[in-house]
Image (spheres, grey):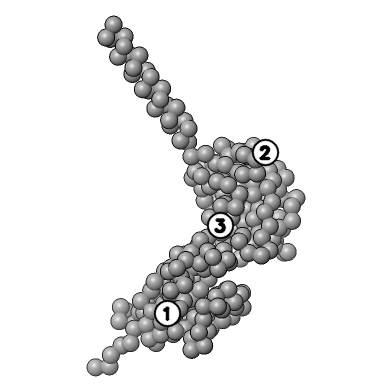
Amino acid sequence: MTQVLKGKLSLVGLGPGSSQLITPAAIETIIKANVIAGYKTYIQLIEHLLESEQEVIQSGMTREWDRAAAALERAKAGDYVALVCSGDAGMYAMAPLVFELLSEQKLDTSQQPEIEIIPGITAANACASLVGAPLGHDSCTISLSDLLTPWQVIEKRIAAAASADFAITFYNPRSKKRTQQIVQAQNILLQHRAADTPVAIVNAAYRDEQLIQISRLDQFTDLEFGMNAAVIVGNSSSYMLDNWIVTPRGYGKKYQLDDGAVRDGQKRGAALAG
């Protein structure tokens, strides 16, 4: 019987773009793999890690399906493939696409390569770290790109997150052709929270072209930003502390309640003793 040679496909998140924020696990995987696949800009981020004997498969921005399919085919043929992407591979990136391909191909266990996901720092975490603690309580991420998701569905998600008082990180907030979605999102949010709710706009976090802008909910759409920015909108409890945005977790209230309960118990105990 012919032995099936099983390869491995590692889906590697490179983080926000700084070499200092690529995890040791990601670096180790990239060094060990004999095939590296990814968008050409992401390949450039890791060129210093690559050796001449490693094969590189790279393509342009809109070729995600082709990259995923090529990486999967090489892994099925027995190669150790690292498919790299920015941020975290499971957040608006390549991992869901690879699993969709696997689902369509309906491979049995003997035909499937080993799949591994190496987590990376996603934009919400990277951008939040630069402006304080805007995601200190319950939060969510919403992409405003309607290329893959109907705008009506996105609107429902914004409204639900707004009414539930989540702090929200918007990915893909605006492009040259898509300018009104972020304004519509702003209008929905203004129905549920104050006009002076703090907003952070972070472009190219931890890269040379990094730009941080702090604004408020009723004014932030007047600023210049594009698809590569992330927009973080605080919840109803968020506030400014100097140049930091803080969304409290609620520890202060908890400990005040605890202290009060202790004091009340002491008073009752003293009264009974008296």
- Image quarter in which the C terminus is found: top left
Nearer to us in this view, 54 or 38: 54
Seen in the image, is 203 located left or right of residue 56?
right
State which quadrant residue 179 falls in: bottom right
Q: Is residue 236 above or below residue 87?
A: above
Q: Using the rendered image of the protein, determine whether residue 217 is visible from the camera's viewpoint.
A: no
Q: Using the rendered image of the protein, determine whether residue 58 is visible from the camera's viewpoint.
A: yes
Question: At x 48% / y 32%, what residue is drawn?
Answer: 252
Q: Is residue 21 above or below residue 234?
A: below
| Secondary structure state at the residue bearing disc 1 | helix
| Secondary structure state at the residue bearing disc 2 | loop
**Residue 225: x and y, percent?**
71, 58
Q: Amino acid at mark 3?
A: Ala
Dot 1 surroundings within 10 Å: few (below 14), some, or many (20 or more)? some
Can you identify the residue that label 2 sits on? Answer: 196
N-term-proximal mark, 2 vs 1: 1
Question: At x 33% / y 87%, what residue is drawn?
Answer: 5
Q: Amino acid at mark 2?
A: Asp
Can you identify the residue that label 3 sits on? Answer: 126
Q: Amino acid at mark 1?
A: Lys
Q: Nearer the viewer, mark 2 or mark 1?
A: 1
Residue at the farthest left position: 1
Can you identify the residue that label 1 sits on? Answer: 32
**Residue 21: x and y, percent?**
52, 64
N-term-proximal mark, 3 vs 1: 1
Residue at the farthest top position: 274
| Secondary structure state at the residue bearing disc 3 | helix
